[in-house]
Image (cartoon, rainbow, N blue to C red):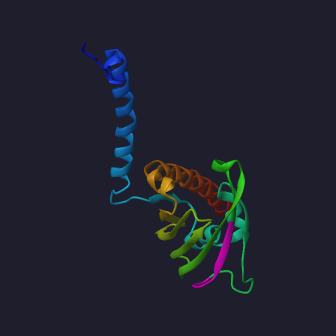
Amino acid sequence: TEIYTLSLHDALPIWVKRIAIVFAVLLIVPAVALLIMGHRKNAGVAQVAAEINAPPDQVWTWIDDGDKLKQWVSWMVDVKYPDPQKTNGVGASRVLVLKDANNGGALMQIVSKYSEYAPPNRMTVEVGDTEGLFTGAETYRLTDLGNGRTRLEVRGHFHYSQWFANFMEPLITPQAEKKMAMDMAHLKALAEAQANAR
């Protein structure tokens, strides 16, 4: 007598096999795309710019003063200074306390240190390891356009420490840039309202 063995692969109808292949492709292709995009030249870079109808010295206060930061940076609830005697300038530190809307409103502290400080034209703050999630730097550049107008450019470059966040960077960075653009629009409105009130 002959003994026939039937594998599970042989027992499955052809349509089930095809559906399985489609699902595998639907999972693998996006994963490969994310891996490729994660190695692009500007990975982790988010940047926005706006022309503001206010002079550079007025716009500068909105990015340098902790109380004013809380007015235009979404999610921000507090700005703390480890050394109250040195709140700005190269080497000074500030701690930004944010209510993370992507994490159920949990509080997150971002410790940053000024590495460049040239008011009212340029400022860079280095972001240390933030709760094991990311590190990076953010640079603000103000250009005097004359007639009481300023071009403000903000460029952030971040590296995600956790493997999953790093894998998802191609999706995270555009969302971060979208938030930056919304915050910039808010800053523009506040700075221009202040300038018009004078």
Q: Residue at x 64, y 63 (%)?
A: 195
Q: Is residue 91 magenta?
A: yes
**What is the quadrant of the N terminus in the image?**
top left
Quadrant in the rendering for residue 62 = bottom right
Quadrant in the rendering for residue 88 = bottom right
Q: Is residue 141 magenta?
A: no
- Horizontal and vertical percent for residue 170? 43, 50
- Horizontal and vertical percent for residue 155? 47, 64
- Depth check: give the residue in front, 29 or 136: 29
Drawn side of residue 60 relative to residue 13, left or right: right
Quadrant in the rendering for residue 21 = top left
Q: Residue at x 62, y 65 (%)?
A: 131
Q: Residue at x 53, y 53 (%)?
A: 176
Up-down relation of residue 29 to residue 170 (above or below): above
- Depth check: give the residue in front, 38 or 83: 38
Q: Residue at x 59, y 74 (%)?
A: 57
Specify start and end residues of the magenta stretch as a single range.
89-96
Q: Residue furthest left?
A: 2
**What is the quadrant of the C terminus in the image?**
bottom right
